[in-house]
Image (cartoon, coloured by chain):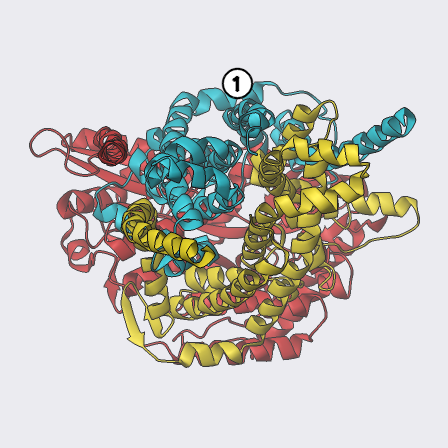
């Protein structure tokens, strides 16, 4: 009896699947079409062009000479490129975990029952709308070894003259601080949206069960916000690997800390737009892309371990 | 099902319709104007301070040529070159635009600029003899002219009168040599108050290049085939520039300069003397502190008198849709009349010999006449096809030299080698 | 119980206030600098309180630049970018999250790859495309790079994934097709996500400086970001004016955020009927 019923269900299922599948495929392709087409034309095609450029030596405008792997060979024996890889990875490894955890913490606080949420959220959002010139000016002042606020405060407790932006061993950390600071508001907004999706009823039930806030966080909040967390971690990691703006704005060309701070995108910019070496710059960005690709694929594989999908 | 598809399509259609509306009311005609024969040219520049001057020239031109209108467009320096690069790659450069020596060869050799050699020879309005020869040559590539000089700049010695007065030291008067410069710098140095005697950063045109040529050295050989950095005279000069911060401690270190710019030091009364180019005059005019407390004098000399000079050029796009009109405008800009307008209104010394007076008169609060005075022994900015590649190396290597990580001897030798390798690849 | 709740709240406020100070610093700096005169703004050591409050910087920069035009161009650019990217991304995100179809992973990789590419790479190729379309120096030029969004697709996909399957299955049994499910059920449920994406799209577009600068040259076609950049000279920038201008330019974004973040709070009301 049971076997019969099961077979019937299966046959019905198969029939439905066929019709449903075709309609599903149709809708799926239709729905992804505008985005995919747009991305191919606007973004993937330029990528292919850049890939091609990486195998050429560029001169003038459009006069490219095929040189095969020359740029890549030069790149692997170029110490400043290798340093840039280390700088970029160091930047990412520190700023992603620290930044995401702080953002999650703030988002959770701003999702709780406290007064003045709107004001706080707007304040945390402010760095994102402040003029980049103002951000650079402020941090450069804070970090200035002779006239800056940090060294002034330190001098009050007897520590003198830290070279925040000009000491090769410290400069990268100083930039990381600014990087983390600038992404808190950004990640907070996304995580707040994710937290809002969690029904309050779950928390109420947990309260009734007598679970404390920390237990509630790990049992309810974290699993249910993990798809959003995954997004935040992946995007923060990708944008950290692409760091450029703050290095460009805060590290002067004559800064001797440059070698230990410059990132791969900075080098790409330098070679493609300043020294007129688009072929070499393209090779550097291809290297970066491969690094990002590997890291992202690893994250995608790992997501099954910690991301809770329903 | 049908309803849904209909809805889907109608939404897409609506988006497209609205977009076309936006496209429709957005498009502009950049060249080729309304009435028959009327032409509109785009003239691209990067300095908003000079816009009034350029617009005045455009207006004067329009009076003589009522069917040609020139639109002056300003793009800030940082983005100007990216934009020009994009324009050259896609064949959509502005009709006429400013050129800078540092980027000139890239555009000339890349066939992005109109070859004006023959036009110049046949022109009755423009005579290249009216411009400093080095400047004209700066804007030639492989023997052909691609731009007409627009202005020139030289470097002079700025000093803080108030500090001199406080210590009873007479102002620089053009008789100073290197020893005198150092001596006064040491007298005015005041570490207790954070004041430096002479600000000596890692800067080419506004610092060590001047010392190099004053000492009889060179950055690049005359035939542009060899680097001048391994010459003893050059190394001596570099040592002198470095010693201000390293040995005599009368200048901020390279690390301090990375935090606070030389301009800031000088404008805040933290530096007694420094070399600045004539382009800084308009900024200094607007700065209350400098206007009140500072003035400018002729550079000190080493074994000989020397100052760096450079200048901008005006060029026409090789692919402009209006070659005749664009050339006419370029031609006009090379006349005495246009240069006189420039001197009157703009922040730069016009390239046409003899038109500087208006510029001097416009900046009476400072002793700016020293700038044109030094032109007679000025050395043109060293430029070569691969400059964009060895220029960053100068910054990199010399920053380490300034900080003491490498010696002047080693740094200069390294730079000479890298530079020679690059020069060897030039045609 | 009440006591510990109170002290908990005080601690939370304490942490948030310290964090707020750090967040506010550049904003305060913008205001202070906008009230200084030019000379004072470049002084070292910098002054915290302007010696004289130069409110005229605001009037000066307002007269100098056509802010009305900048606002209009910016708003147009934002509206179209938001409409395009939110709508197209939501559609694609739903398909990626909920529909099984051949080639799904391949197409999703395209989405991810776009995000991995540094933006500087796109500038010249996109400029070429816009110039070939004859759209240089137009509002459309400002909109084109942002009309589809890989970021948005990825973001919304995560939101759609977080929605329980049961709702969808119920709808399918009811005879709804994919589009109806998408439009009538999924979209309302991810309101927070859509709003977040809208805010981000607006933010990225509003902040973008390099693209508007190279693609639109006439001052009347510039949005706020590049319009303000025309205050930058080659060697010197009037920082007080630039800061005053930036303060004037901030308000559309702040207002947008304040209005929409109230929607965040209400977000729960519509998702209450989840289970």
In percent of width and height, residue B77 lies at 44, 46
Work out whether residue C201 can be spotted: yes
| Quadrant in the rendering for residue A106 | top right
The percent coordinates of residue A217 (x first, y second) are 73, 43
Q: Residue at x 55, y 21 (%)?
A: C58
- The answer to whether B347 appears left or right of B199 in the picture is left
| Depicted A85 relative to depicted A236: above or below | below
- Quarter placement of the C terminus of chain B: bottom left
Question: Residue B217: x, y in percent?
Answer: 54, 72
Residue ID at (78%, 62%): B248
Chain B tint as drawn = red
In this rendered view, identify the residue nearer to me: A139 or B234. Answer: A139
Q: Please tell me whether residue C186 is drawn above or below residue B123 in the rendered image.
A: above
Camera-nearest residue between A86 and A74? A86
Q: Which residue is mark 1?
A: C59
Mark 1 burial class by Cα count in 10 Å: few <14, some 14-19, many 20+: few
Q: Nearer the viewer, residue B35 or B137?
A: B35
| Mark 1 chain | C
Q: Quadrant of the N terminus of chain B?
A: top left
Residue that appears at 75% across and 36% down: A206
Q: Total of numbered circles in the picture? A: 1
Chain C visual colour: cyan
Location of residue A147 in the rendering, given as x and y in whole percent from the top left corner: 77, 44
The colour chain A appears in is yellow
Q: Secondary structure at mark 1?
A: helix
Q: Residue furthest front?
A: A1
- Decide if residue B147 is on the left or right side of residue B235: left
Q: Is residue B356 above or below residue B243?
A: above
Looking at the picture, tell me which residue is in the foreground, B10 or A51: B10
- Residue B270 seen in this snapshot: no
């Amino acid at each position: 009896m049971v076997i019969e019923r099961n077979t019937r269900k299966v046959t019905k299922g198969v029939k439905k699947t066929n019709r449903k599948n075709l309609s599903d495929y149709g809708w799926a392709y239709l729905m992804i079409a505008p985005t995919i087409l747009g991305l191919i034309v606007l973004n993937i095609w330029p990528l292919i062009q850049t890939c091609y450029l990486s195998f050429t030596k560029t001169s003038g405008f459009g006069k490219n000479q095929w040189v095969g792997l020359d740029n890549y060979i030069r790149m692997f024996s170029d110490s400043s490129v290798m340093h840039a890889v280390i700088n970029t990875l160091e930047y990412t490894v520190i700023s992603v975990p620290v930044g995401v955890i702080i953002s999650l913490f703030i988002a959770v606080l701003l999702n709780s029952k406290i007064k003045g949420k709107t004001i706080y959220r707007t304040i945390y959002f402010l760095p994102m709308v402040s003029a980049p010139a103002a951000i650079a000016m402020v941090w450069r002042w804070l970090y200035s070894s002779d006239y800056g606020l940090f060294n002034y405060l330190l001098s009050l407790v007897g520590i003198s003259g830290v070279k925040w932006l000009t000491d090769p061993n410290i400069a990268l950390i100083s930039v990381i601080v600014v990087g983390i600071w600038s992404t808190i508001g950004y990640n907070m907004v996304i995580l707040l949206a994710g937290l809002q999706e969690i029904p309050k009823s779950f928390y109420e039930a947990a309260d009734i069960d007598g679970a404390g806030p920390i237990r509630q966080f790990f049992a309810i909040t974290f699993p249910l916000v993990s798809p959003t967390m995954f997004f935040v971690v992946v995007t923060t990691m990708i944008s950290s690997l692409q760091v450029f703006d703050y290095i460009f704005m805060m590290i002067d060309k004559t800064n001797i800390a440059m070698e230990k701070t410059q990132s791969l995108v900075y080098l790409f910019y330098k070679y493609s737009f300043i020294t007129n070496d688009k072929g070499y710059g393209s090779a550097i960005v291809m290297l970066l892309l491969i690094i990002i690709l590997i890291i992202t694929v690893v994250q995608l594989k790992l997501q099954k371990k910690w991301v809770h999908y329903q | 099902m049908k309803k849904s598809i209909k809805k889907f399509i109608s939404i897409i259609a609506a988006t497209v319709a609205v977009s076309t509306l936006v496209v429709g009311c957005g498009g502009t005609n950049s060249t080729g104007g309304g009435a028959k024969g009327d032409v509109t040219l785009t003239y691209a520049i990067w300095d908003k301070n000079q816009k009034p001057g350029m617009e005045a020239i455009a207006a004067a031109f329009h009076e003589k040529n009522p069917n040609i209108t020139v639109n002056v467009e300003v793009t800030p320096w940082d983005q100007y070159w990216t934009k020009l690069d994009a324009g050259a790659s896609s064949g959509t450069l502005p009709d006429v635009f400013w050129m800078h020596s540092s980027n000139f060869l890239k555009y000339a050799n890349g066939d992005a600029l109109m070859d004006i050699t023959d036009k110049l020879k046949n022109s009755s309005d423009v005579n290249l003899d009216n411009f400093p020869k080095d400047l004209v040559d700066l804007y030639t590539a492989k023997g052909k002219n691609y731009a007409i000089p627009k202005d020139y700049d030289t470097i002079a010695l700025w000093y803080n009168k108030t500090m001199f007065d406080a210590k009873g030291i007479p102002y620089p008067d053009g008789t100073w040599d290197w020893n005198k410069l150092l001596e006064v710098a040491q007298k005015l140095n005041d570490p207790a108050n954070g004041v430096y005697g002479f600000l000596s950063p890692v800067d080419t045109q506004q610092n060590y290049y001047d010392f190099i040529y004053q000492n009889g050295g060179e950055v690049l050989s005359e035939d542009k085939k060899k680097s001048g950095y391994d010459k003893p005279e050059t190394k001596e000069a570099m040592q002198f520039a470095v010693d201000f911060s390293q040995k005599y401690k009368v200048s901020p270190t390279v690390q301090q300069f990375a935090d606070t710019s030389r301009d800031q030091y000088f404008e805040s009364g933290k530096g007694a003397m420094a070399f600045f180019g004539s382009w800084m005059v308009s900024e200094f005019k607007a700065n209350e502190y400098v206007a009140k407390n500072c003035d400018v004098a002729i550079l000190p000399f080493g074994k000989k008198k020397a100052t760096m000079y450079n200048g901008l050029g005006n060029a026409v796009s090789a692919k402009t849709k209006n070659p005749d009109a664009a050339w006419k405008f370029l031609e006009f800009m090379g006349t005495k009349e246009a240069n006189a307008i420039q001197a009157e209104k703009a922040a730069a010394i016009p390239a046409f010999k003899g038109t500087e007076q208006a510029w001097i008169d416009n900046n009476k609060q400072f002793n700016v006449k020293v700038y044109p005075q030094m032109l007679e022994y000025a050395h043109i900015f060293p430029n070569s096809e691969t400059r964009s590649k060895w220029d960053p190396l100068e910054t990199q290597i010399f920053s380490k030299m300034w900080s003491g990580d490498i010696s002047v001897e080693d740094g200069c030798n390294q730079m000479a080698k890298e530079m020679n390798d690059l020069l060897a690849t030039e045609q | 119980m009440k006591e510990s709740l109170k002290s908990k709240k005080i601690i939370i406020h304490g942490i948030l206030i310290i964090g707020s100070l750090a967040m506010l610093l550049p904003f305060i700096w913008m205001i202070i600098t906008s009230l200084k005169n030019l000379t004072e703004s470049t002084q070292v050591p910098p002054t915290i309180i302007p010696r004289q409050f130069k409110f005229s910087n605001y009037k000066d920069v307002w007269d100098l630049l056509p802010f009305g035009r900048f606002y209009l161009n910016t708003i147009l650019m934002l509206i179209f970018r938001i409409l395009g990217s939110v709508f197209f991304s939501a559609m694609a995100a739903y398909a990626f999250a909920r529909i099984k179809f051949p080639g799904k992973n391949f197409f999703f990789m395209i989405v991810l790859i776009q995000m991995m590419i540094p933006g500087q790479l796109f500038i010249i190729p996109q400029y070429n495309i816009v110039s070939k379309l004859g759209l240089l120096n137009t509002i459309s030029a400002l909109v084109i790079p942002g009309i589809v969004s890989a970021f948005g697709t990825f973001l919304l996909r995560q939101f759609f994934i977080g929605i329980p399957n049961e709702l969808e299955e119920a709808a399918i049994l009811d005879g709804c097709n994919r589009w109806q499910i998408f439009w009538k059920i999924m979209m309302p449920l991810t309101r927070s996500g859509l709003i977040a994406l809208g805010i981000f799209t607006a933010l990225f577009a509003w902040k973008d400086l390099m693209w508007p600068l190279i693609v639109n040259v006439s001052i009347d076609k510039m949005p706020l970001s590049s319009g303000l950049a025309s205050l930058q000279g080659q060697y010197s920038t009037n920082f007080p004016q630039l800061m005053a201008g930036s303060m004037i330019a901030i308000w559309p974004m702040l207002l947008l955020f304040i209005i929409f973040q109230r929607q965040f709070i209400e977000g729960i009301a519509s998702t209450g009927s989840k289970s």
